[in-house]
Image (spheres, grey):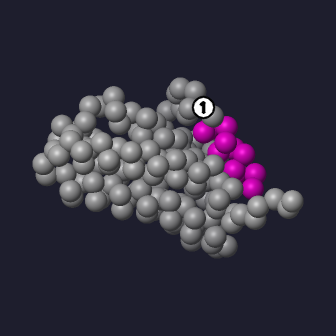
């Protein structure tokens, strides 16, 4: 049987990681909504939109042929991922959940931001080592770093 056909963006590890974050976020939303913590609708809506924005900008950017357009979409995706991290901080500040509960999501977002930073640097012609704005620590982040080098070869 022939291999399943994929869009190019579906092959990117960063895209798959963004999908993983959205799945993780869906479970978090269910927990938070069950807790009935007041005054969270705005931050949850913003977090939902920002997570989708990161995913969609990554896909659209990868489909662009012009380098500057790719950089702009990847940069927008990176900004949306950072916005997601801030929303998670706001959820903790509003006492909807504990800081430990959001750490997995923030780890995923650190990896997303790191990979997108590498892709942006690649298309801007900047050496990848000089663009690392996120410290690469922990096994999850190290694997993301290695995968970003693999993506750069594509």
Q: Can I make out residue 58 in this image?
A: yes
Q: Which picture quadrant has residue 95?
A: top left
* Residues in magenta, as a range: 144-154
- 102 vs 74, nearest the viewer: 102
Residue at image coords 33%, 54% = 47
The number of numbered discs placed on residues in the rendered structure image is: 1
Residue at image coords 13%, 52% = 39
Instruction: Indicate whether residue 28 is drawn in magenta.
Output: no
Left-right relation of 78 to 145: left
Left-right relation of 80 to 92: right
Looking at the rendered image, the quarter that the C terminus falls into is: bottom right
Residue at image coords 52%, 27% = 137
Mark 1, residue position? 142
Q: Which picture quadrant has residue 80?
A: bottom left
Q: Residues within 10 Å of mark 1 (few under 14, many from 20)?
A: some
Task: Indicate the position of residue 85 as horizontal and vertical percent values.
Answer: 36, 45
Provide the secondary structure element on which disc 1 rests.
Answer: helix
Q: Which picture quadrant has residue 37?
A: top left
Left-right relation of 137 to 5: left
Tell me if residue 33 comes above or below residue 105 in the rendering: below
Looking at the rendered image, the quarter that the N terminus falls into is: bottom right
Secondary structure predominantly adopted by residues drawn in magenta: helix
Judged from this view, the residue extending furthest toward the right is 1
Task: Indicate the position of residue 23 as horizontal and vertical percent values.
Answer: 47, 49
Residue at image coords 69%, 56% = 11
């Amino acid at each position: 049987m022939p291999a399943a056909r994929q869009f190019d963006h579906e092959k990117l590890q960063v895209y798959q990681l963004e999908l993983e974050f959205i799945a993780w976020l869906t479970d978090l939303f269910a927990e938070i909504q069950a807790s009935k913590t007041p005054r969270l609708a705005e931050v949850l809506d913003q977090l939902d939109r920002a997570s989708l924005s990161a995913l969609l900008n990554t896909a659209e950017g990868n489909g662009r042929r012009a380098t500057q357009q790719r950089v702009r979409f990847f940069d927008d995706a990176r900004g949306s991922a950072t916005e997601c991290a801030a929303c998670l901080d706001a959820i903790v500040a509003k006492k909807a959940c504990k800081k430990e509960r959001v750490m997995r999501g923030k780890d995923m977002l650190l990896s997303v931001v790191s990979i997108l930073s590498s892709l942006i640097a690649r298309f801007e012609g900047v050496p990848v080592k000089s663009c690392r704005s996120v410290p690469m620590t922990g096994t999850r982040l190290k694997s993301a770093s290695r995968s970003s080098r693999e993506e750069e070869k594509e």
